Image (spheres, grey):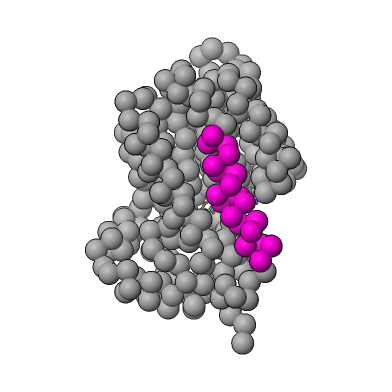
């Protein structure tokens, strides 16, 4: 990956075609970053790249890739690993599946692990060595409040996010003494395409529980400047996370199961 100029910072954002990823791309371009936009939808990435170039005068490159497909993931890894200054990697692409695990389509469950876990691990592994060598750069791994507890009826999803939390926390410790930063970003309900893609009926979720993708990204980038490892955006989500950490797991998984049962489509 070549830098457009020495002063310019450069970020690569996965899942940049909608939701939180698109909000990261817009925020970072406004801050003057050149951006590389990764997702499957070429047309949406091209449109966003054009918008960012026109509005902010930055270099914006669309890199269409299905990150669950090993050869396509490999192309993005190679781009990251070529050793030339990426300042920020945002591992944001992800999706969820809802329902009783025994009834869910197993290939879709595997894809969820490939995207939410395998792609995130491989891209982190590709980007980190040059960041450490330069002693600068940052990686934001987009997790979820769902990663702090068992997630009945979102079992695979919750497990992928628990992985992201543990993985990112471990890396932070490995990077102690380095200027390279890692962050686990743990949003709650955020207005994006996520719920529709996961076939969740969230019509009963009260409005105070929701955040915009832009507010989530503002919180993340502010926390990154402070060097925070964990970013839980929004007071309502901080309260949920605090309660979750205080209550017994037997209770949090029961409550989580009851709440999620009401938003997923269960068979039979
Ligand atoms: N929204 C929430 O309430 C919420 C809460 C907690 C955590 N999160 C997390 O936030 C992250 C972003 O989700 P979002 O809410 O912004 O949802 P979203 O609007 O559905 O965005 C998901 C992004 O991931 C991309 N993507 C999906 N499959 C992909 C694949 N196989 N290869 C490459 N890119 C792929 C999508 O683009 P294409 O379809 O074009 O590939 C899209 O850009 C996810 O990791 C999610 O788990 C969301």
Q: Residue at x 51, y 14 (%)?
A: 7
* Viewer-closest of 250 and 28: 250
Magenta stretch, main secondary structure, is helix
Residue 156 in view (yes/no)? yes
Residue 101: image quadrant is bottom right
Quadrant that contains the C terminus: bottom right
Task: Indicate whether 223 appears above or below 128.
Answer: below
Residue 2: image quadrant is top right
Quadrant that contains the N terminus: top right
Task: Indicate whether 73 appears above or below 197.
Answer: above
Describe residue 51's horizontal placement relative to residue 154 as left or right: right
- Queried whether the magenta region covers residue 108, the answer comes back as yes
Q: Residue at x 42, y 43 (%)?
A: 168
> Residue furthest toward the bottom?
268
Task: Indicate whether 49 appears above or below 102.
Answer: above
Describe residue 192's horizontal placement relative to residue 139 as left or right: right
The number of numbered discs placed on residues in the rendered structure image is 0
Q: Residue at x 44, y 55 (%)?
A: 162
Describe residue 98's horizontal placement relative to residue 164 as left or right: right
Task: Indicate whether 34 appears above or below 201.
Answer: above
- Queried whether the magenta region covers residue 175, the answer comes back as no
Describe residue 24's horizontal placement relative to residue 239 as left or right: right
Return the x and y of residue 150 as percentages of the image width and height.
42, 66
Residue 26 in view (yes/no)? no
Return the x and y of residue 147 as percentages of the image width and height.
43, 57
Task: Look at the image and give the residue range highlighted in magenta.
Answer: 106-125
């Amino acid at each position: 990956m070549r830098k457009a100029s020495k002063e310019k910072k450069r970020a690569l954002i996965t899942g940049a075609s909608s939701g939180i990823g698109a909000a990261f791309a817009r925020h970072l371009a406004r801050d003057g970053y050149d951006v590389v936009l990764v997702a499957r939808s070429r047309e949406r990435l091209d449109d966003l790249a054009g918008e960012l170039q026109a509005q902010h005068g930055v270099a914006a490159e669309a890199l269409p890739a299905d990150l669950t497909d090993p050869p396509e993931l490999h192309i993005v890894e190679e781009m990251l690993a070529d050793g030339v200054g990426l300042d920020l990697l945002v591992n944001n692409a992800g999706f969820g599946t809802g329902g009783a695990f025994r009834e869910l389509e197993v290939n879709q469950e595997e894809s969820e692990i490939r995207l939410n876990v395998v792609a995130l691990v491989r891209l982190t592994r590709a980007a980190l060595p040059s960041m450490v060598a330069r002693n600068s750069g940052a990686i934001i791994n987009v997790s979820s409040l769902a990663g702090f507890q068992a997630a009945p009826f979102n079992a695979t999803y919750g497990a992928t996010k628990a992985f992201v939390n543990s993985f990112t926390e471990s890396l932070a410790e490995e990077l102690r003494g380095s200027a390279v930063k890692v962050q686990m970003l743990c949003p709650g309900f955020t207005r994006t395409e996520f719920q529709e893609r996961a076939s969740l009926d969230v019509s009963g979720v009260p409005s105070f529980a929701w955040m915009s993708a832009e507010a989530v990204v503002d919180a993340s980038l502010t926390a990154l400047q402070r060097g925070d490892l964990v970013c839980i955006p929004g007071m309502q989500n901080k309260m949920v996370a605090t309660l979750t950490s205080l209550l017994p797991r037997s209770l949090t998984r029961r409550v989580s199961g009851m709440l999620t049962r009401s938003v997923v489509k269960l068979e039979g």
